Amino acid sequence: MIQTNEADAGADTASAQREEACTLATVRRVAAMLDLEPDQLITGAPLPRGWHFVLLAADTRRCALRADGFPGLGVPMPDLGLPRLMLGGRTVTFHQDIPIGSTLMRRSAVRSILRKTTASGPMAVVTLAHDLCIAPQSEPAVVETQTYLLLAPRTPGSMAPEAAPGAAVSAAHLKTVVPDQTLLFQYSALGFNSHRIHIDRDHARQIEGFPDLVVNGGLATLLLTEFLRCDLGVTPAAIAVRHVAPLYCKRPVTLAADPAGKGWRLKAFDDQNRLAVDMEVTVL
């Protein structure tokens, strides 16, 4: 049974506006992280869709970080007495390309906080929204909404048993990637994300109950959008991502893509062929 406290849902509880720069140096570092040739990126060229994550990085002071190290993204993430945090999903709409070298105005806000009581204990669903506007325009070039789950601490024996392995993955297009610790570090650094489940193996195992470092949800999304862009030659107009289960460091991830109506359906499966990420893509 799930009980919901609607009183916490509604208007913005926190918001911020600040200037961001889509610098060539930062974009080249994203390319290097993805093992692409950095010098192919030039000022004035469109930022590859999906790379805007570097413009959503936090600059939260260390004294304001949550105990798990998560800085929030542009606005502080509330604690609510719930020390564990997981990404539940995101939607992104690309209204226009962002030129490399451009200056943007970023608006970030906590849209809602929804408290729930479940059989596993209290939890909260926090929704963050971000607009990226190319200066001096007032209409956003990119709009992203993220949903996070705030959870109660693990108790001894509370780690749910892993689901049974899935059937062999079948799709029109398949690719296998292995996110290693270097990739997790570089992605976390580019996004200034100090969430300890991605960078502190002892914390991930002993405090959070995971078997290893957890692959950033945003990184999993980026691997899928890069599969779409580089391998399939598809430019997304919008994506909707649902995070079903964690992916872990140094374990193979199978990326699968199928045409779906006028768009695409992409999925990421863990090393046991279990669904971890489900993404619907609307194309231009």
Image (cartoon, rainbow, N blue to C red):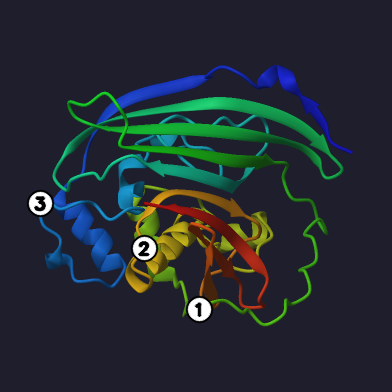
178 shown above or below 33: below
Q: Residue furthest front?
A: 261
Q: Residue furthest right?
A: 1
Q: Earlier in the sequence, mark 1 or mark 2?
A: 1
Q: Disc 1 vs disc 2: which is toward the camera?
A: 2
The disc placed on residue 234 is: 2
Q: Amino acid at mark 3?
A: Thr
Left or right of 44 on screen, residue 239: right
201 shown above or below 21: below
Instruction: Name the residue beneath numbered marker 1.
Output: 174
**Residue 50 visible in this rendered orientation of the protein:** yes
The disc placed on residue 266 is: none
Left or right of 275 on screen, residue 222: left
Q: Earlier in the sequence, mark 2 or mark 3?
A: 3
Q: Secondary structure at mark 3?
A: loop
The disc placed on residue 43 is: 3
Q: Position of residue 170 (x, y in %)?
A: 61, 79
Q: Position of residue 79 (x, y in %)?
A: 60, 32
Q: Nearer the viewer, residue 274 or 61?
A: 274
CB contact under 8 Å: marks 2 and 3? no
Q: Secondary structure at mark 1?
A: strand
77 shown above or below 41: above
Q: Nearer the viewer, residue 43 or 158?
A: 43
Q: Nearer the viewer, residue 185 or 30?
A: 30
Q: Nearer the viewer, residue 112 or 152?
A: 112
- Residue drawn at x 17%, y 47% is 23
- Residue drawn at x 45%, y 64% is 224
- Residue drawn at x 19%, y 71% is 37
